[in-house]
Image: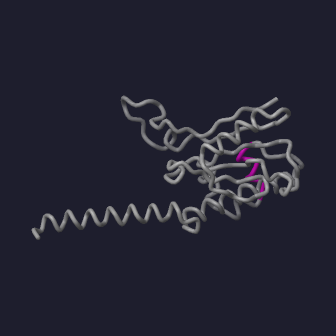
Amino acid sequence: MPARSRVVSALALLLLLWAARLAWDYLDKTSVAHEAMETQLKLFGAAMYEYHSSTGRWPASVDDLAQTSLPHRSYVWRQTARTLTFLWPKDISADPKQNANIVLAYDHAGLFNNLGRVWVCWGDLRTEHVREKDLRARLRLAANAVGTSVQHFASPPFRETYLPKRKGLEQNPSPREPIRTAKIA
């Protein structure tokens, strides 16, 4: 076998192994990437309840969470917040068990999310890896519910903020944007 075809075969094998590892990480819920996102979402959810128990108000921005123990528990919390979309519900119970159907935050950035599934932190502080279209449908239902009050804060999408703009491309080169909801009266 010529040396050139051996090199091509070796490169093809490395590419196949890389793709297999990526697929394994995507499907394996115990991978480091999945566990890290679950942990961060739970920390942010717990910080929302902590802020409410200390002030009597629900947080309205990420800056409010700086008054909780979150900065001490996660030194990368501000960087992580940039990749999350927060829904700041105002009329929820102080008991997390009663808020099982309310979305507190979800992750809108990263390769895994571009494959159609997103990590969600629910009001009872459980996390779940759900299909993006299911989350969109759930948020539309919540936005259309009578008497629902949802205040939305979203960090700008990662692609818009951190990647350089290229000539000839739109402002957001990706058709995928974080799910946006509005404050409901």
Residue placed most toward the observer, 11 or 86:
11
* Relative to 3, 123 lies left or right: right
On the image, the x and y values in percent for residue 113 come to 54, 50
**Which quadrant: the C terminus?**
top right
Magenta-drawn segment: 61-68
Q: Residue 53 occupies which quadrant of the picture?
A: bottom right
Picture layout, residue 146 above or below residue 128:
above
**Which quadrant: the N terminus?**
bottom left
Residue placed most toward the observer, 78 or 31:
31
What's the residue at 71%, 63% (across, down)? 72
Does the magenta-highlighted stretch encompass residue 106?
A: no
Picture layout, residue 16 above or below residue 91:
below
On the image, the x and y values in percent for residue 88 come to 76, 43
What's the residue at 79%, 46% (across, down)? 59
Residue placed most toward the observer, 67 or 53:
53
* Relative to 61, 10 lies left or right: left
Q: Residue furthest left?
A: 2
* Secondary structure mostly taken by the magenta-highlighted segment of the chain: helix
What's the residue at 78%, 52% (across, down)? 123
**Colour scheme used in the picture?**
one colour
What's the residue at 83%, 42% (across, down)? 90
Does the magenta-highlighted stretch encompass residue 67?
A: yes
On the image, the x and y values in percent for residue 175 come to 49, 35
* Relative to 125, 7 lies left or right: left
